[in-house]
Amino acid sequence: MEIGLVGKPNVGKSTLFNALTLLDVPMAPYPFTTTAPNRGVGAVRVPCPHTELGQPCTPGNAACLNGTRWVPINLIDVPGLVPGASEGKGLGHEFLNDLRPADGFLHVVDGSGGTTPEGVLAPKGTQDPAEEVEWLEAELVAWIHEIVDRDFEKHARSAETEGAKPEEMLQKRLAGLAIPMAAITAALRAADVDRVHQSHWSRTQREALSLNLLRIAKPRVVAANKCDHSERGAMEALAEKVAPVPVVPTCAESELVLRRAARAGLVEYVPGASTFRVAAPEKLSPPQKVVLDRIAGIVAAWGGTGVQQSLESLVLERLQRVVVFPVEDDGKWTDTKGRVLPDAILVPTEATVRDVAYRVHTDLGENFIRAIDGRTHRALGATTVVTPGAVLRIVARK
């Protein structure tokens, strides 16, 4: 899974990216500090089943901390997008194309209302962050529409001649955008289009279809950054304006400071927590104490920094992903090497146990016989939908 961090310049995208990945990419209070995509790995939290087993797990692809598994998520931070990006303004085409594989977007806005559309600092409260959400959606829709619309009539007539369904025609057009067939079908279902004569679709209908494709296939969550320079009422107003897109108040700068301080052993802090504790007061300089005191106030006021929550809101709620644990021994929950619950796999909520088998290895999916539930030891058929946190043994033909 890949998540794209998007937004206009100078809203704190790179700071939030650094906080989620602890990579030191350039940051500065002026536009276009990021001039090329940054890639890294964040993580979402889920309970680890080893607590039920009564013995520690042996994490492989996902670290475990105090009964919580941190399941990795690929992140890409693209340079700031400005109005007109879909027409190439600010190298927008190049930056948008970097987002093609993204499953969803974490849209970072300046929640304090202190940054112009071009990324220039302005007095707090003079800009409306809801407008950032609106124009970026318009740019993303225009980007998808440009791909759909390219030589559309020719491809539509060809599909009609061949008797191809509109889903099949669109899947070819959108092959580079990682949009699954189910999302294309849902977008068509929501659109008022002729499903027999695609060549009759008007430009307005194709634009509406592009909007449906964006909203269904590329969900977004708004990370309203710089919440420490805003007020709760302003955040609530923003959430009301951009609904149903969720808004998570965030303070990326505070999260980054806390994660770096924890790495240095100065504080005890688990990302996403609503509190932290100074571990070594004697090691702190007076300026460091001032900074941590200020962050303590922010965390107390907002219930945390919101950074970890924004990513999890997108992955676990908007993208509706769950985590399952494949094993070789459904009694001991181990793999062939005796490792306990080594792997944690992220799958869609509607995934079947056979889908999980394919995720583990293509051969397991193609030769699937059944799955065994590690908790109940009951056999599960190929079409059984997985449950969150399921421990599964896949049985396949040799």
Image: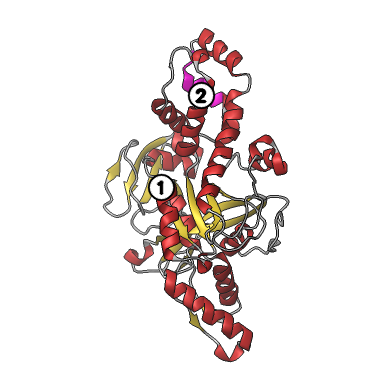
Residue 248, horizontal then vertical, whole percent: 45, 58
Return the residue at label 2: 204
Q: Residue at x 62, y 50 (%)?
A: 117
Question: Foreground residue, 107 or 129?
Answer: 129
Counting every numbered tag in the picture gives 2
Q: Is residue 390 left or right of residue 116?
A: left
Q: Residue at x 37, y 44 (%)?
A: 349
Residue 114, horizontal then vertical, whole percent: 59, 60
What segment is highlighted magenta in the picture? 164-172
Q: Quadrant of the C terminus?
A: top left
Type of amino acid under label 2: Thr
Q: Residue at x 43, y 17 (%)?
A: 195
Question: Foreground residue, 156 or 180?
Answer: 156
Q: Main secondary structure of the magenta part?
A: helix
Question: Foreground residue, 106 or 331?
Answer: 106
Return the residue at label 1: 243
Q: Residue at x 61, y 29 (%)?
A: 146
Question: Foreground residue, 105 or 366?
Answer: 105
